[in-house]
Every structure is written in structure tokens, then in C-alpha cells.
Amino acid sequence: MLEKLFQVINRIERLNMVSMHQMRRSVNNLTKPLGSLGRLEEIAVRLAGITGSVQPSVDKKAIVVMCGDHGVVQEGVSAYPQEVTGLMMANFIRRSAAVNVLAQQAGAEVQVIDVGTLLTDLPEGVVRRKVRPGTANMAQGPAMTKQEAVAAIHVGMDTAYELADKGIEVIGLGEMGIGNTTPSSAMTAVFTNHPVEQITGRGTGIDDEALAAKTKVIERAIEVNQPDPGDAVDVLAKVGGLEIAGLAGVIMGAAARRVPVVIDGVITGAAALAACRIEPRCRDYLFASHLSVEPAHRIVLDELGLKPLLHLDMRLGEGTGAALALPVIESAVQLVSRMATFEDLGIPSPAPEEDEFSLAVDGLK
């Protein structure tokens, strides 16, 4: 199974600096003061680097909602019962969830994938890729085996490849799994070496007493399993989740196909941390949609070196933040392709030629 993982990793290339240089020149020639479109300019430059094209397109969009259940829910870490995972999957298929509303507005399709829920009778329309029915209770032992974690990563890689083959040009990440802020917080603590109490949040809205208990559960899970921060697959297997591993696979598969990825909140952020620990070049293909109010999310984004596009005090998940960010990313492309240039007006560009390449490199930051 590892052979396929390595094959995908070996296909992940660095950003195309020539395309970025050309895009920065195009951006600087638009009829506006230099840098006045701020981060929209950075987005356009990085999209050029990702796709290798000075005319990138993000017209065809998809949001992948990976779904899995978590044995650690037995420890009382969530305000909602585990059955809600399956109920929400049906809600996604009915196109009645928040992510569906926002995805439709952004012109994105929503793909719902069962990589590890407890549900046996799946709603029609859910893609069945179940590795196992839920993880084990990580407070008592490993959430899954390494082989299962790799299998879930493969599900994500295959999904990204299938979407790329369909012509999808940008992928947003979403998830559903009651209790999944617990493994994502545990993973963040392991990867960043931050104290668990600084990372653990309220998730679905637990009270102070439950938050204190959740923090202790995460500390116990890390103590019991001793995940190796230098081995991302080990971390996923011991204190992660099946949908989190699946999302990490989507990131790696998309990067291998030069497709940009928009991460959502703290759960997809934990998946991004895992993917970037497996292959650091994945980071260049990521856009951070927003900053969640979950305390781990800021730590995750700082670790990845990503700046969120939006600040809306959200903590829903599902891919809602990614859906909201897709039009912002599309706006960057539209501005470059449709705005007039100084040449169109018959006047010289204000951009000094000797600075253009360094400005292109700035788009990586």
C-alpha cells in the first residue's frame, strides 16, 4: 500500500516560478496602483505557480466532505450523539446543509464520501469508500492501525484524481464526524508541541465542565498511544480519524495533479498538517479559507504558514468556510483576465522591471 503513496508523493512538484513571474508582471500591469488589490494579487500569482499557467481557471469547483465516526465519543467529548453523523450525511445529499447552500452559491458541486462512519445503509448519493466502521476509542488505544490510516489516505488520493479527471480545477475540503475536534486537537498538539489546554476548544458547544474533561481525554490519548510526531501516519493512526486521513490524501492527490486546495477549519487543518508532514511541498497548494474560533486553528495555520482569507468567527465545519472562500479566489482570476492594462491605455507600467521576480517569490509567503 505504501508504494502507491510514494508514487503520488513523487509527482508533487514545486511551484512554477516562471509562471509566477509572468503572472506578477501581468498583475502589475493592470490599471491600479502597485499592490492595491492586496492578497487577491498573491492568490493570482500562486495559482499561476500551482497550475503552471498564466491564465489559470477555477471555474469548475468541488467540495469534498469526508465522513467518519470516532470511538472517543464514548468519553463524552461531544454535545451531540454519534447518530448525528449519519443524519447529516443524509442532509448533505438532500442539499439542505449549510455547505450545500454556500457551495451552490459558489457554483461548486459537493461530493459526500463515507470513509469510516458507523452507518450501514448509506443514503443514495453518498460515495461508499468505508475503510472500517468508525475508529476505536483513542483514549484507550490506537484509533486504527497504520494500514487502515494508509487505506484512508488512498481513498482521498483516489478522490482527488477522480475529480481532476473530471476537470475540477479547485477542491474545497469539508468533513463530518461527531467528536472529530478531539482527534484534530490531539494531532495538532502532537505536531506542534503545544499544550493540550491551549489547543482544545468547545467543538459542538460543550460547557466548561465538559471542556475540562475533553482536555483530559486528549492528554490521556496522547499518553496512552505515544504517537511519533516525526511519523504523520503514526499520528493519524493513533490519535487521528478516518475522515482526517482521507482529507490528507485529497491534499496529496490534488497537489500531484496541480490542483489548488482550499482548507476549511480545524479538522481539515489537522489533515493539512499531516499531509505537509508527509510531503512538505503540499503546503504550496493550500489556501486557508478562514480562521475558526477553535483555538487549535490559529496554531495550525501558523504552523503551515498560511493566512486566512476570511475572519467570520465560524466553527461549523462541513466545508462552509471553503465554500465562502471559493468566490474570493475566483475573483482574483477574474480581475487578472478582465481588467484593462496600462498598455491598453497607452501609458507605461509603473512596475520596475528589476523587481518583478522578487515580487513573484513574495507570492509564496
Image (spheres, rainbow, N blue to C red):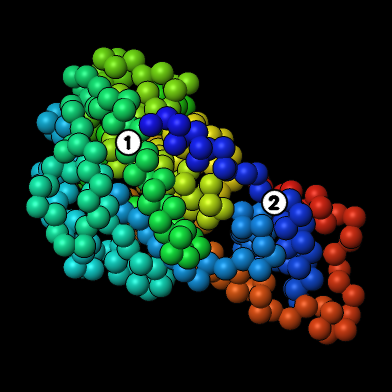
Height in image: 340 above or below 208?
below
Q: Nearer the viewer, residue 154 or 307?
A: 154
At label 1, the amino acid type is Ala
Q: Position of residue 93 (x, y in %)?
A: 21, 64
Residue depth check, mark 2 versus mark 1: number of the one nearer the observer? 1
Task: Name the mark on residue 165.
Answer: none
Q: Quadrant of the N terminus?
A: top left
Q: Position of residue 220 (x, y in %)?
A: 25, 18
- Tag 2 secondary structure: loop
Q: How many numbered discs, if any?
A: 2
Circle 2 Cα neighbour tier, 10 Å, few/some/many (<14 / 14–19 / ≥20): some
Residue at 39% x, 68% y: name it: 108
Residue at 16% x, 38% y: name it: 133
Specify the quadrant of the image occupied by residue 62: bottom left
Q: Nearer the viewer, residue 109 or 294?
A: 109
At label 2, the amino acid type is Asn
Specify the quadrant of the image occupied by residue 349: bottom right
Height in image: 365 above or below 330?
above
Residue at the extreme bottom: 345
Q: Nearer the viewer, residue 96 or 142?
A: 142
Residue at 35% x, 67% y: name it: 109
Residue picked out by circle 2: 16
Task: Say left or right for 204 vs 294.
Answer: left
Residue picked out by circle 1: 151
- Tag 1 secondary structure: helix
Residue at 80% x, 49% y: name it: 358
C-alpha gap between disc 2 and disc 1:
31 Å
Q: Position of residue 69 (x, y in %)?
A: 19, 40
Of the two numbered discs 2 and 1 on the same chain, state the one appearing first in sequence.
2
Task: Say left or right for 24 vs 139.
Answer: right
